[in-house]
Image (cartoon, helix red, strand yellow):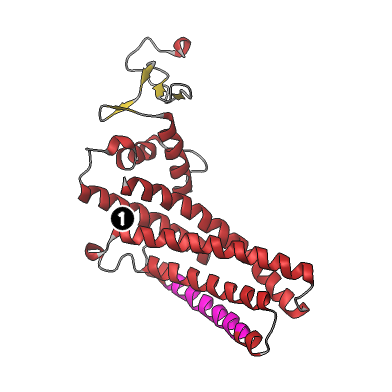
Amino acid sequence: MKEYKSDKESMCYLLMYLDRLGGLCHCISQGQKIVINKKSIKAAEIDSALQFVTSTDRDRDGVVCSDCLYKYLRTLGEVSEGFLTDAEREEMVASYVRDVSVRMAAELSGYSSNGFSDKKYEEHVRLYIKKLNQTRSQWAALTLKLREKNGDKTLTELVDHYRALYRLESVFLFQVLSLDDNPDESDSLGTLRFMVGISEKVIQLSDMIREKTHDLLEREAISEDIQKSLRKHSEKRKETEYKFSNLAKVLGEISAHSDS
């Protein structure tokens, strides 16, 4: 790293060196450890910041801005200890949770416009929730039908899992729309834990759906009509699982620093 060090104190290459052995982060142009709030920045913190920022800010085509990394380090990194008051930290957590969740809601509902705070966005998400509830009712009716006919237990459970999956998605979206209701009275940490819980349940349900589908196909215990219905919803389930998996990682990162 010495060969790249600049002779000018004002020179900045906008490059960092992550020392994996020493565990710290260095400024390449100045050949010094990067320090914020009198604390050395760890390489692992930069890794976490990169993962978090690239997951939450998707409008930069892969380019991560230094301001975004700095904001993460000052609010969620180890250097934030003693820098933010509890109220300031909670305000930042609320901001992160809202931004991440609103983007997630837009992706789930297929909302393509850039504005997330207008009436058009809210109406779009509410219409999507209505469609989810209609689909959930269809799965519930099929579950009841299978139980009345003493159908295959695994198949009945699989159908009910799909009903629960659509329910969780609609609950999540409704919670997102409620984030702006009485913001002064909202519990940001409680909302964060609720969102994490929903994400984890979606992932667990998706795993169970995968296992039960495999079992039923191997036993040839699914009728052609139900197979068509499952194929129709399988791709959406995979996309939903993927999105909630990413959400769980991001919110889990926020939660870990909020509880510390």
Seen at 29% across and 69% down, the residue is 181
Q: Is residue 151 left or right of residue 73?
A: right
Eyeballing the image, is 91 above or below 150? above
Q: Which residue is mark 1?
A: 94
Find numbered disc 1 in the image and state the secondary structure of the residue it sits on: helix
Q: Is residue 254 left or right of residue 92?
A: right
Say which amino acid is labelled 1. Ala
Eyeballing the image, is 34 above or below 46? above
Q: Is residue 201 visible?
A: yes
Seen at 53% across and 57% down, the residue is 243
Please provide percent x and percent y for residue 141: 59, 86
Q: Is residue 113 visible?
A: no
Count of numbered marks: 1
Please provide percent x and percent y for residue 7: 37, 9
Q: Please tell me whether the stretch drawn in magenta is mainly helix, strand or loop.
A: helix
Q: Is residue 27 left or right of residue 94?
A: right
Seen at 57% across and 60% down, the residue is 241
Please provide percent x and percent y for residue 201: 50, 63
- Image quarter of residue 81: top left
- Image quarter of residue 222: bottom right
Q: Is residue 170 left or right of residue 69?
A: right
Q: Which image quarter is the C terminus in?
A: top left
Magenta stretch in the rendered image: 123-143
